[in-house]
Image (tube, rainbow, N blue to C red):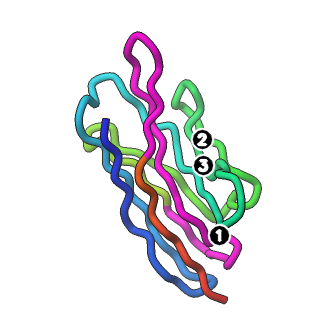
Amino acid sequence: VHLVESGGGLVQAGGSLRLSCSASGSTARFSFVGWYRQAPGKQRELVAVFSSGGESTEYSDSVKGRFTISRDKDKNTMDLQMNSLKPEDTAVYYCNAEEYRLAVIDHWGQGTQVTVSS
């Protein structure tokens, strides 16, 4: 499974961006997990994920109410709508998915930079 993120960029505080993650390759037994981010000098952190059953979503407290995760299983895409962006949202955002073979294989995209100016 190959994941490619897009939609990052530079935006002013209060603005919006929509990130997309597209999956290709062996997608027969895979599912999107969610979005993570990593700011300079910090560890990668969860932003928004789907529950293990895929029926609900979870958000970090810092983005709750501002970000919305969604996915289209037919198109093998996952999006992150980010509104009311803050400078502290500046980070590289990563798409995460799992592939189910004899073991669960974790897949990550290359990341897309989001920069929010004050």
Identify the mark nearer the N-term, 3 or 2.
3
Q: Circle 1 sits on which residue?
A: 89
Please check the rendered image and state whether residue 38 is part of the magenta-colored stretch, yes or no.
Answer: no
Q: Residues within 10 Å of mark 1 (few under 14, many from 20)?
A: many
Q: Secondary structure at mark 1?
A: helix
Q: Is residue 14 left or right of residue 4?
A: right
Quadrant (top left, top right, bottom left, bottom right) of the N terminus: top left
Asked if the residues shown at circle 1 and circle 2 are in contact, with their CB atoms under 8 angstroms apart, the answer is no
Residue 57 badge: 2
Read off the magenta span: 81-108
Q: Is residue 62 above or below residue 13?
A: above
Marks 3 & 2, CB-CB < 8 Å contact: yes
Give, as a three-letter code, the residue at label 2.
Answer: Thr
State which mark lies toward you, 3 or 1: 1
Residue that badge 3 annotates: 48
Residue in the image at 70% along x and 57% along y = 64
Quarter of the image that includes the C terminus: bottom right
- Which image quadrant for residue 76? top left
**In this orientation, which residue lies closer to the viewer: 32 or 84?**
32
**Above-or-below relation of 62 to 88:** above
Q: Secondary structure at mark 2?
A: strand
Q: What residue do we see at 52% from left, 83% from top?
A: 11
